[in-house]
Each structure stands twice: as structure tokens, then as C-alpha cells.
Amino acid sequence: MSHYVVGDVQGCYDELISLCKKIKFKPNKDKLIFAGDFVNRGPKSLEVLEFCMQNKKSISGVLGNHDFYLLYLIEHKKRNKSLKPILESKSVNRIFKWLRKQPLVQKIKINKSKEIFYIVHAGIPFIWSLKTAKKLSNELQGELKKDSYNILKKMWGDSPSRWKESLEGYKRYRTIINYFTRMRYLDANGDLKLKKKDLKKEKNHIPWFEQTIINLKPKEYIVFGHWAALNGKTKFKNIIGLDTGCVWGNKLTAIRLEDKKIFQINKL
């Protein structure tokens, strides 16, 4: 059995299927994990989710910011042009239930190498240990099952910008979601700097992984998506970016965790 993690698909279904053929993905044997953003912007978001649910015993993922947006649209009966096929699908309720079950962090241990991979959409800030990140993922996942309507309604906004364990209620949930699904830059104190998206150097804007790397042991890895401008490059072998901008005309990327081999498909 092999574990494959694929970067932001964002509705690029044809490229996803081509990539699955390239890696020779076998649903009855292998595992395929999405690094968030299953949907949006691309032309076939519904087909991507139907493919996932058809193979739900072998396919899973973590939630990205676009996935949270879709959950909000479904729960609050909102309209959206690019996601209209999902919102009007007979499978919309089944899609909602499946997507809502996905965590914010997946921890995968490869027994042969004893390496541990943490799969997340945007990243894990240095102010959280890996154990804390998994705990907060579990917390948010549990709360979504109980109170998704209000959490999804109140998740919008950039504040609080700094995590505190004392945060409560919807401010706490919003902050957890923002770190896991929207983070790119932090300041030296761990405050989110959500406005900046480009790669130009700016005072007090530090790429999250440049600080988080000190928290990782030699056999611990973080695999993430979200930041297409990086084109997968972090300069750290233990922190692996997979968003290579397929939806923007570039490539769709996957990694096989057992040997860390990279597979790519050009935009079709």
C-alpha cells in the first residue's frame, strides 16, 4: 500500500484523473489524501467530490479555505456561480456530510521508515506543537458536527490575529480555521499576517515554515498546499509544499510518502 498526497485540485478533475493514472493509484490498495481545496475556481468541482465519495474508503483529505466556503454556501443556502453544480446537485447533502467529516490535520505514520507526516492545508504555526495542532483539529472537527451552522456563519474575518489558548467560542474557532487554512506569513510573535500573498520581502512578515522548522524532529514532516506562489519550494526537506497552481495553468502535484517521490501533471 502507498500513500499519495495531492496538492490543491480546486475542481481540476481532468488533471486529477490523469495524475491518478500516472501514479497508478489503486483504490482497493492505496490511499489518496487531498491537502485541502478540493473545490472552486476549476471547472469540475462536483466531479472531484463525486470521485472522492465513490472511493471514500481510500480517499480522504484536510479542509482548505475553499472547502469551508463551500460548506458555508450549502449550510446557509447561498448561491455561487462556480460552485452552482454542487449546490444544485441531488448529492449536495451527502457531499456536505462527507466534506464536514474531514479534519484540519491528518497524521500519517509510515511503518517501514518510521517517518511521520502531518498533512494540512496552509500549515502549522510555530506557536503550536504538532500534538497541539492535532488536538485543535480534533476540537474543531467535533464542534463542526455539533454547531456547523453558527461556526460557518461566524468564521469570516481576520481577527483575532494571534492565538491564545484562552480564546473561547466562535473567536476561538475562527482563529483555528485561519491558522490552518489561510496562513502564509506570521510575525515574530506568531500573529497572522493575512493580507500579504506575494513573495516580496516585507518587514515583520515571516513565512510560517521558516519558524515552524525548529519544531520538527528529523523524521517528522509537514505536507501542505494553499500557497501557489511558492511553487512547492520551501528550502526545507521536512516541509513540503504541493500547491503548484494547477488551476492557474501550471501543474497538479502529488507526493508518495513512502519514498517522497514527486509526481506532476501539466494543466490540460
Image (tube, helix red, strand yellow):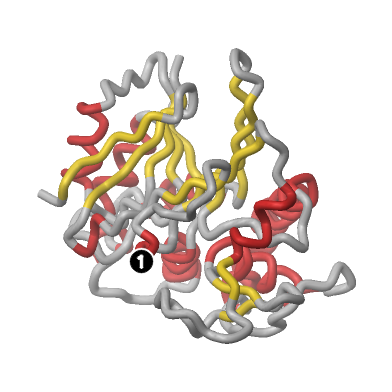
Instruction: Give the number of marks.
Output: 1
**Residue 138 appears left or right of 1:** right
**In the image, what residue occupies the spot 63% across and 83% down?**
204
Identify whether 92 is placed above or below 74. Answer: above
Instruction: Spot the residue most to the right.
Output: 166
* Foreground pick, 88 / 216: 216
x, y percent for residue 163: 77, 72
x, y percent for residue 13: 22, 46
Identify whether 234 is placed above or below 101. Answer: below
Identify whether 88 is placed above or below 200. Answer: above
Helix or strand or loop: what does disc 1 sit on? helix
**In the image, what residue occupies the spot 69% across and 72% down?**
175
**In the image, what residue occupies the spot 60% across and 65% down?**
208
**Residue 197 appears left or right of 218:** left
Q: Can you identify the residue that label 1 sits on? A: 229
**Screen quadrant of the N terminus:** top left
Residue 176 sits in quarter: bottom right
Residue 217 sits in quarter: top right
x, y percent for residue 75: 49, 66
Q: Residues within 10 Å of mark 1 (few under 14, many from 20)?
A: few
Amino acid marked by disc 1: Ala
x, y percent for residue 160: 72, 82
**In the image, what residue occupies the spot 67% across and 84% down?**
159
Instruction: Spot the residue most to the left.
Output: 268
**Residue 121 appears left or right of 218:** left
* Foreground pick, 77 / 169: 169
* Foreground pick, 64 / 155: 64
Identify whether 56 is placed above or below 152. Answer: above
